[in-house]
Structures are given as structure tokens and as C-alpha cells.
Image (cartoon, grey):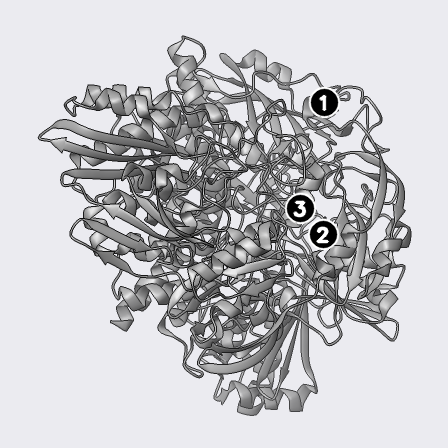
Amino acid sequence: MLRLPRFKYLRPKTAREAARMAADLGPRAMFVAGGTDLFPKLKRRQFDIETLIALDFLPRDIRNGSIDCVVGAGVTLAAASRDEHLTQSFAGYAEAAGLVSSPPLRNAGTVGGNLCVDTRCNYYDMTYEWRKAAGFCMKKDGDICLVAPSSPRCWAVSSSDTAPMAIALDCVVSLTGPDGERELPVSALYRDDGIEYMAKQPSEVVTSLKLSAHRDTRTAYAKVRRRGSIDFPIAGAAVAIQLDGDRVVRCRIVLSAVASHPLEATAAEAFLKGKRVEADAIRETADIAAKPAKPLDNADLSHFWRKRMVRIVVEQALLEATTKTPGSKVKLLGQPQE
Amino acid sequence: MKQEVLREVERVVLALDVNGERTELLLPVHKTLLEVLREDMQLTGTKHGCELGECGTCTVLIDGRAELSCLVLPIQVEGRAITTIEGMARGAELHPLQQAFAELGAAQCGYCTPGILLSAKSLLETNARPSRDEIREALAGNLCRCTGYSKILDAVELAAGRMS
Amino acid sequence: MTPNGKFGVIGKPLPKVDAVAKVTGRAIYADDMLLPRTLHCRILRSPHPHARILSIDTSAARRIPGVQAVITGADLPIKFGILPVTQDERALEHEKVRYVGDPIAAVAAIDEEIAAAACDAIGVEYEVLDAVMSIDEALVAPKDEPIQDYGGPHNIHKLVALEFGDVESGFTRADHIREDVFFFQGSTHLPMEQHSATATYMDGRITLWSSTQVVHYVHRALSKVLELPMNRIRVIGAAHGGGFGGKTDPFAHEMIVCKLAMMTGRPVKCTLTREEVFYAHRGRHPVLMWVRTGVTRDGLITAMHFRTALDGGAYGSYGVASTFYTGALQTVTYDIPAYRFEGCRVFTNKPPCGPKRGHGTPQPRFALELHLEKIALDLGIDPVDLKQRNFVKAHTRTVNWLRVTSCGLDECTERVMTASGYRNREKRPGHGMGFAISSYLSGAGTAIYWNDMPHSEVQIKVDRGGVTAFCGAMDIGQGSDSVLATIVAEELGLQPADVRLVTADTDTTPIDLGSYSSRVTFMAGNAAIEAGRKMRGMLIEAVAAKMKCDAAAIEVGSGRIGDFSFEEASVLAEGRFGTLTTAGSYTPPKIAGPYKGSGVGPSPAYSYTACVVGLDADARTGLVRVNKIWIAHDVGRAINPLLVEGQVEGSVYMGLGEALMEEQAFRKGLHKWPSMLEYKSPTFLDMPEVETFIVETVDPEGPYGAKEAGQGPLLPVPPAVCSAVYDALGVWIDEVPVTPEKIVEALRRKQKGEPARFGPARFPTIPYPPTIKVEPPPKDLDRAAAASI
């Protein structure tokens, strides 16, 4: 049986207290909410820690204002995927939450946790013994990148399903640090680096996610993975699109699992803005969106094929957002049927 | 690299509510619920296939919802209602799902069966008459290598019909 | 059987005898056992695919508090292996490691985390050797040294070359000759339960509880390695969490816990981690295949030449048998008048391959079915018609001497054709249907080691109305215990639940060779019938004496024997005969052909399967969604149709996994993804509806006519998937798994005017030995025997 390493377990009552503990203890302490990402990685000895700081206090409610919807970071992905307000007003977000891993993991995994989920690489998400045999990589215990040995940086892949959608929706996270609180757009939460993939301070706790509804904004998330469940995304596209009639007023397209951070397809967004939503424009937008995606050979299936799929998921998400009723699911082939 | 074994073990006294029975235990805080159920409480009906959240074999119910006991610490679920396969039957009387699984041959090697039964129980408590596709969605975190899933779907449908 | 000729319990969809134990979590699997004072064992494994061990330093590990014993290869130097000809494994290697995961040292400690830390503290010095990771690399001179010190040339393990009938003149007779190359990727069993074993040693005796399919072979191997007589070793099969062939070898951890128990005087348990299960492996061999077939204008086969190259991994395992199996069963579905087979297995620095569901036959079945589809297209004949024209007939001998008895190929084909609407299917791009057939053994006709003993034995004890059946057979979830109980119940007029079972325990049960090669229903079933009929005879005789009537007038059924309840009858019989025990045994008929290697392939009966797969395939993405599978299986007789359907559906599932996603892949000498996340096993959402048809041909030698259901139905699924992909998109994917990227690449080639296929380009040059020519069997070989049945 794979087992967890020994650790001390702290249970602060507030986010401020948690942040102070984290600041005091430094890198040998980590936060734990749902544990669905952290515990497997601890069992594989991907982190050396002495202390876990529990985030049990995180709010687990979804507060709907007239414009804003504030989702507590402790809300489970299952609850978020089924919440009536979210499925109606932020269909893409609910859809992304409902496509994370598998049902039992969504019952434990949280909204905050999925935003902070560690970057992944199939040279890194392996047991200690396997990594020792392969030679340790720079993300843990080693000094080179095994997928791109001549590269000075780590190419682990951002694998959150909800983060791209949160960026596409201009969401804002509330952070609590040892000295105070601040808000940060989700788009500013990440860095393009496989190791230092988050821009927040390690001691800052994500306490909530604020979604804002623009009228006429339609959203959709399309995800590719090998199986209908359990798997992380190997390509995904989150789309939020605001229409005036059939003309695009505003559009955000953010890709998952093709870089070390959620990758915004800015050129494609600019291209589609002002255009009418029709098949040719969508296809061309998808082509442009796929260009900056540079998947490497460190996730399931070949990177050539994953690159090809970026275009498809963008197209799927745009089609779904613009032609289907909110909340309905367009399924890729190989995905579960309705 | 593996120095953590030399570290001191933090132990906690926890009162766990498992299958309606409250038990106080002195536990290393880093021991998962899976390990505690099997090794400290002799509830070996909860099986394990990967201990990494990838197979669903160790599914238990926490306040009625299916979660993976390999990714849960007992300290996180103190005071919450934990249900394992041992808590499914009422006395000697099988739960309708257990009865249907037995009748229809939905358990072959039986190793994934406890986890699947609990996932199905959780489903039927929120959706009394699920469609076949809804059953598939609800059980999609539980792998089975023997059955090809057909008989499991049949059994959940049969039990749902009998229960409602 | 009741007097009116109807069965009492045979053919009824009754629950399995262990169903309640399994649905309540009360079945005790190997890892559920925790004896008092148990020590926990972890194994240190090689981080190198190929290296010499220069030194092992266990001193730091021994100093860790809680560590009770540390052993290395020097403590268990005797080699073992499942086949007598390849005794090439050690429980722990101290001279050389041959794959990442090869066991080197083992620790017993008071808990598992201490044992794991102690393993990490063991220092091993290696001299790293060049690793051989492919068939091509294994066929040339190694840079450093061969992986094993036997076989050859280079890293070749085994070479076979056989010819049955006159192949050259067969090709001369052909109107059309076609050659194709195929590749079947390796895959692993992935049982949900990780292997686990617990051993105790007391008063000079070892007891081992293990998750194994073959208590008998483990028993033999332990005796050899531990240097203890078999009567000092007891092996008990715990409730079993899935095998599929993956627990059919004796394993290192089984030897290790015994040795550690002998050293420490305490129970020792070892449960492999999921990653270690990928290294224990013995799974599907990756096989490269070349096939050349001659046909007449009407599509009748005149000759076939089949070549295989198996990537065996680092050790022998079942490999010699696997090699023969890649050439054996082509002839039991199609009438091939002249047949030549050349096989080769190589060693590579990977976990050893062995038997996985279908053992060595799904790979050639895949090649053969697609090859015949292509021939049909060449000739402009419907592929189903072409295959049907060549179907073997019941009660014939194949050119390689395999004896076919009952054969339901035609009926199976018609069932799936009708149900699927294959012949009238809508032809539209992106949608396709594919058809394939297969056959499998109902038990291997020869044992793994040469002996004249029965392959299965059953004892029945009746005492105060209670019936207990004893048999060494191991229920691995397929329901062999239920089959035994059903047969005994049938003979004694009872219900299966009335029969207590004692199985898979080498101290208390008579021999059964184990749950492999789909042998248990056929062999243990026949033994149970024999024992059951003897017991029935004694009960009837006692009742007839009491009733003062002729034994022939006594009816048995519904819990009664004549005028008496079963319990009353058993008291009468015990009074008349003393202790009521009977025994039955089964030895397969000696039907192997007169040539070396003829022991692989013969079976007392063959099951037959036909399958249609309906799917959508998307040209832009290469994604495939299987919508439905129709499968008809000739099981001979369904002892319990519920269990047969379960075996068929489970086989379809595993075949579909292999067809679409499962892959034991390696990168830089390491298993690429030894986890259940990255090794893709289909989920509930990836499995289509399956419509199963049971076909009963009532085999003359099977128990009540039964054959097998556990393996054969896997075989047609991969080729049917590929055939359906061709039907949908017009490209051949000549290898599994059929991943979306392969389909996209094949479509790209098609668009460029290149051959519309993805698959291996060529078959390597292999130094096959001179071909042994075997005369086909005489036409009337089995006529006398058939008449006597």
C-alpha cells in the first residue's frame, strides 16, 4: 500500500491564521483542502513537507448577488457543477467543474483546490522509485527537464479544467495572506513556469472565487481526454462570448493543458471580435487559437495529436457557446454520450 | 530522500462514526481513512487498488456522498457519518442493491464490488430512478476489470425498481 | 438430471455461491488477512533495465529500528520458473538485473513504512549494461552481453518452424496470394486486486495464503526454492481479486514471504503496490506478425504461412508455450489444408510477458481476421462469406492434428449477423461495422510438467445430510466454485447452496492444476460428475434396499432420493456403506500430434465465437466511439447462463480495452505509465452496450456438453474494431491499440495517395531453424473414437 509521509497537521480557524502559519513554516508546510491532488503527490513523494495546514474553515457556500456570484473556495466541484445558479448563469464553469476527474473526486475536490492544482508531467507524476530510476527532474530533486533536456525551464502542464474558464469569465479570487486580504484576477494568478506556476504568495490562501455575469455572455468548456472519466485534460478550451444579436462584442478563449499556465488565445479573441458567429469565422478563430499551443511529449497521447485537437476543442466550445442553449453539453467523440 | 520515516509521529485521538457506531481511536494523523478502516478497525470490506485516487476501489460514503478513503484523513471526517460496505446491509438482511448484485452476477471477483455498491447507494439516495446513462455517469469513477459493467448496470436498475 | 431428462439446476441463472460474501465485503482476500504479530515486507527493485550487480550493502537498512530481517539473492539462490525448460528466475537477483522492477532485496519490518524506508536505505552498486528494448534490437548482436545465458543467437529465446501438409503446392494451386504484416501491442491484466501473500512458519511447516490462480504450481516452486518437501508446505488460495492470467506464475514475493517467515518466526505479508503489479506483469506479448495466404478464386484457402516474433521481456515465464500458441489455433476456425508456422520469441529488458486472457492467440487472431478481410476485398467477395466458406466443420482434425469436436461457428455467425443487421448496414462515412470470429481451448490437453496424473480431481463427502466437495480448483471470480457446486448438486438432486466447498488448499483438496487455459469447468466439471455419480449410486442403492425396489426405479431430484429426503437417504447410505466419500478425476484424451511442440494447442474441445462491432469514427480527430457490440459464443452448454454472460461481457470489455487504449509501453528503459491513471482501462462511460447470445452445441466430452467462456470471446473484438474502422473511414489500422493519432495518420497517408493504412512496415529477418515437416493426420483418425462415445 502506498502511504503518506509523516506530517504534523494544523487546523487553523481562519484564513489569516492559516496564512500566518504558512508564512512561519515556509516551504516545508502546505495547505490541504480536498486533498485529491495533494495526497497522491505526497504518496509519490513529490513534495517534502513536515506540516499540513488544513483549510477546513473555507466557506462552502455559493452567494448569488444580482451581478456577482461568490463561490466559497471550499465548495466541492460536485456541488459547483450542480448548483442551479452556476449552471444557469455560468454554464461553462459548472460544466468544467463537472468534467474534473471522476465523481468521488469531485465530491472531495474543491473550487479553490482546482484553481491551485499542481502542474503535471508524466516524468514527474510518478512514484519516488520510478523517478529515482528515470533520474530526477528539475521539478523535484533533479536539475534537468526530462521532456526537454536542453531547456532551462520546467514544462509541466497546467491541468486545471476550471482555471481557464475562470479566466475566460474574468473571475477574481480573494486571497488572504498573513498581513491582509486582496483580490486578484484569476488571469494574474498563474505564471508560465512548470515549477513556480502560481503568481500568488505561497502563504496566501484562496478563499473564494467571484464570477460576474455580463448579460448575453455565453460560456462553454470543451475537454479532451482518453476516457469519459478519471483522466486529466490533454486539451481543453474555455470560451466566454458576449453577443449583440449574432455579432461578437467580446470574446475570451482560454486553453487548458497545452502550456504551463492556462493559455489565453488573444490573437483569436481579437480576430473574432466584431465578427458574426458563423461556421467560417469559428473555424478560422479556432485555427488562430491553436497556433500558440505547444504541447510537449509529457502527457497522454502524442503532442502532435494534442496540438491538432486544440483547434477542435476551441471550435467545439465556440459552437456550443453560440448555438446551444446554456448548460447543454456538446460531447466530443470518445466522450460520454448524452 | 526518504527521511520522513525518522520523523516523530503525530498521534491524535479521534471519535469516528462508522456505520452508525462511534469508536474512539488513537491514530497517527498521517494514516488515511482507508488504512484506518482496514488496519485499525478490521473493516477489510473496503478494498484498495491504487491508493492514488485513480480506481475507485476504496470508495466509502461520507455523509452519504461517495469519496475515496485513500485520499481522506480520519481527522478530516471526525463527526461525519462514514458508511462502509459492512454498513450496507440491515442486520442479516441485504440492501436491495446487494441483493440485486448477487442475483444478477454483478460481482465476479468482487474486489471492486464494495466501492461500486456504495457509489450506487449514494446515487439512488439522490435519484431514485436513474436512467442507464445516469448510472454510468455516477459510477464512472469506479473501475471494474471483470464484468464489462453490463451486469452492474442491470443490477442497479433492478434494485432501483424494487426500491421505488 | 431428473428422470424426465430435464436438468434440475444446470442451465439455471442462479446466483454464485460466494455472491453474498462478495456483496457484503465479507470475502477475505489475501491482503485482508492480518495474523497476530505479522511483519510487513517490501521489496527493493532494480532501477536499471539491464545491469550487473557489483555489491549490495544492507547494513544501513538493518540498523533502522523496526527492521526484523533483510534478505538478498544469496538467501534464495535457487532458480525457478513456471515451465520446466525455463527455470530462469530468482526470487531476488544478486548477480544481474534484467528489467526495471527486477527484485533485488526484501525487508521484513514491523510496519510497511519502515520496510519501505529500509529498502531505500539499501545500497546497490551496479555496472550498467546496454538495454535491449525492442524485437529488432534483440535480433542483432548485443553491445554488452545477452540478457539470458541460454537461447540465442543474440537475444533470441526460442525458435520454432513447423510445416503441416505441402505448403508449396498449396500456394501453387492458389489463384491469389496475399501477404500482410500486423502488430499487436502488449498489454497487462490489471486485476483490481494487487498481488498479495502472507506466510507463516511453525514447527517446520510453511503455510502460504496467496492471491494466485495456481496453488499447485506455487506449491511446487516453493518446494524447490525453499528446499522443503511438498508435504511441509501448504498453499491456500485466498478469495481472489482478479487474475486474467496475471497470477498464473509462481512469483518472487511468494517465495520471499515464506523465507522471511522462516527466518523471523513470525507471519510475513507482502502486498505489491500497483506499480509493482505492472512489473510483475506476465501480460500479453507484443507480437509482430507476417502472414501469407493462398486462396482460390472462390476464396477457399489453399495454403498459409504464418510468422510471429514475440517480445518476451526479460524471462521465460510461459514464453515457450506462448510462442507455440501464436501458431496453433489458426487452423481450428478455418480449414487450412497446408500450413507453415515459424515463431520466434526474444528477450528484452522489460517485465516478462506471459499468459493474458487468450494466451498467445489474440495476436494471431487479430492478424488472421484482418488478413482474410483484405483477401476478400481483393477478390470482391463479402468478407463474411469468404470466412464462412472456410469455416472448419465439427468432428474433424486440423492439418496440425488438432481435434475439433463440436463447432458452433455457423450458428454464432448467423446470430450476430441477424441481430446487428450487418448485411444490410447503412453505408455512410464515419459509421462502420466489423465482423470477426475466434476459437479457444477448453483447457490445455497437456500439463505444464510431464506426468501421468489426472489434471483435476474432486472428492465428495456426504455426512448427516451435508455435502462437501473438495477440489484444488481456484475460483478467481469466474465462478468455478459455483460451477462445481452446481454439478455436484445436479447429480445429487440438490441446490448449489446445499453443497459446501473446500477448494484451492493443497493440504485438504485433491489436485487441480489451476485456473488457466479455461480448463476448470471442463476438467474439474468432469471430475465432479464422476464423483457425483458415484455418490448418487451409493445413495440410490441404500434407498432401493430400504424401499425394496429396483435401483433404476429410484428418482433423484428436488432434495429427495426415492421416498426419502436427501438427509434420510444419506443416513441410510452411511449405515450401509460406512463413511460416504467418493472421488472422480479427469485426464484429457491423448490427442496430440506426433511432433515436437504438439503439446501446445490440443484441447478436449474448442469454444467458438462470432462478433460484430458497430462504431462511429471521426475523420478529423481520429476518435472512435463504439456504439454496440453483438457477440455470440458457443459455450457447448451453459452450466449457468448468468456466469457465461458475465464471462463473455468481461472478455468483450478486455478485448475492447486492448483494441482502443491499453498499452504496456516503455520509454528510456522504463515502463512509461505504471499507474491506473495513465494505463487506460475503460470506464463505465467508455463501454458500449453488449448483446450476448449463448450458443449451445453440447460437446460430446464436456460436462453436460459444456466447453469454455472465459477467454475465447475476447479474441474477435480487436479485429472486429479494426474492420469497423475500415468500414467507417476506409483505412486499415493494422495494429492495436487503435489510437486516434494512428487513424489521423492513416487518413493523411490515404489522402497523399500512399497505402491507406497504419501499421508495421516490415517483418524482420529471423534465423528460423530448418522447418520440421509433419504429415497431416489420416482422415479417419478419430472415427473409431467418435463412434465409441
Query: How many angstroms separate mark 2 from mark 3 (CA)?
Result: 9 Å
- Tags 3 and 1 both on a single chain: no
The answer to the question of whether label 2 and label 3 lie on touching residues, with beta carbons closer than 8 A, is: yes
Residue C636 placed where, x, y %? 48, 52
In the image, residue A136 above or below residue C512: above
**Looking at the image, how many numbered discs can be counted on the residues?**
3
Circle number at residue C137? 1
Callout 2 amino acid: Lys
Q: Disc 2 on helix, strand or loop?
A: loop
The residue positioned farthest toward the front in the image shown: A179
Residue kind at label 1, given as amino acid type: Glu
* Picture coordinates of residue C519, whole percent (x, y): 61, 53
Residue A100's spot in the image, x, y percent?
Answer: 39, 47
- Note whether A37 is above or below A280 in the view shown: below
Chain letter behind tag 2: B
Foreground: C758 or C289? C758
Q: Are marks 1 and 2 in contact (CB under 8 Å)?
A: no
Furthest toward the top, the residue is C753
The chain carrying label 1 is C
Q: Dot 3: few (<14), some (14–19), or many (≥20) neighbours within 10 Å? A: many
For residue A89, side relative to residue C580 (left or right): left
The answer to whether residue C373 shows anywhere in this view is: no
Relative height, residue C441 to residue C666 (above, below): below
Q: Residue at x 27, y 58 (%)?
A: A62
Name the disc covering residue B2, or none: 2
Q: CA distance from mark 1 to mark 2?
A: 37 Å
Residue on which the image places disc 3: A128
Residue C288 appears in the rendering: yes
Q: Position of residue C695 (x, y in %)?
A: 42, 50
